[in-house]
Amino acid sequence: MTSVFEYHLVVYRRVWRGSALSTFVLPLLTVLGFGLGVGEYVDGGVDGVPYLDWIVPGLIASTVMQVAIFESTWPVLSSFNWARTYEGQAAAPLRIDDILGGNLLYVLFRAVTGSVAFLVVAAAFGALHSWWALAVLPISLLLALAFAAPTFAYSSSVTSDSYLALLFRFAVIPMSLFAGVFFPVESLPVGLRWLAYASPLWHGVDLSRAATLGVPADWSVTGHLLYLALWAAGGYAIARVRFKKRLVV
């Protein structure tokens, strides 16, 4: 597994400049645009918390989701259909768990790197109010795995990138808008509210918000963690079956 992880790191070392803007500059622009720009028009903040401080943990969780899903879609499909990287790895003395686990480790690395960059920017703007903010890093790891593992299962089950575009159109964008990142989920109609609660993103947002603000989470922390772990474990199990079906003759 570590050899596959190392392979992806070596590839990333050659192309990291292409993602530097989104990883390190985008958090700064997002905080300036939404936190300060939109926050100027939100009198009194949200639940007594300044809008910048309230929105930052949501933006961190949303960024983790987007990085995890992006790295689990086109790169995975390409490794099966076009570059055929997985076939080469399967021909080597590597198990399915090595190939899948090593690639997932790389996705977690990318997601947590983005989370660290966002935390640094948030700290510079004084948006972190507790040492519990450091807990955002393990939360981001679990949240990234909760998204990456099921997405690996999905990407290994389709044959065209048109299906990947559908994933972003009908899952990623709605979750980004309605899972508590920009406004409280409680302001949604009841039906949409429960759809938001069902998304892993809302659980990551609530945990991250509690950590950065140093307040209790709206729901049980244990319940949040178990729910995210369920998505991660279920996604990994399905992805493992799909990888085995496509790579083991």
Image: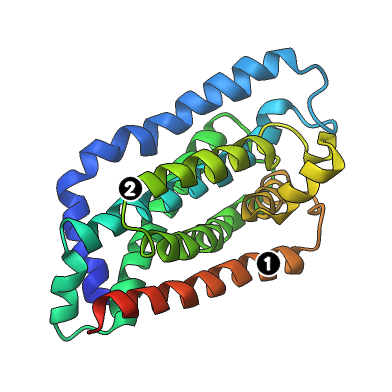
Q: What residue is shown at x 54% (from left), y 20% (from top)?
A: 33
Quadrant location of residue 17?
Answer: top left
Q: Which mark is residue 227?
A: 1
Give the class, few, some or many, for how many residues have Cα within 10 Å of label 2's Cα (few <14, many ≥20): some
235 in relation to 171, above or below: below
Q: What residue is shown at x 61% (from left), y 19% (from top)?
A: 36
164 in relation to 40, above or below: below
At label 1, the amino acid type is Tyr
Residue 5, horizontal then vertical, whole percent: 27, 68
Residue 140, horizontal then vertical, whole percent: 54, 56
At label 2, the amino acid type is Asp
Q: What residue is shown at x 15% (from left), y 58% (from top)?
A: 83
Give the class, few, some or many, for how many residues have Cα within 10 Å of label 1's Cα (few <14, many ≥20): some
Q: What distance separates the C-alpha of mark 2 from that of mark 1?
A: 29 Å
Q: Quadrant of the N terminus?
A: bottom left
Q: Please give left or right for residue 232 compared with residue 217 in the image.
A: left
Q: Which mark is residue 177?
A: none
Residue 45, horizontal then vertical, whole percent: 79, 25
Q: Please give left or right for residue 193 compared with residue 122 in the image.
A: right
- Badge 1 marks a residue whose secondary structure is helix
60 in relation to 112, above or below: above
Q: Which mark is residue 161?
A: 2
- Badge 2 marks a residue whose secondary structure is loop
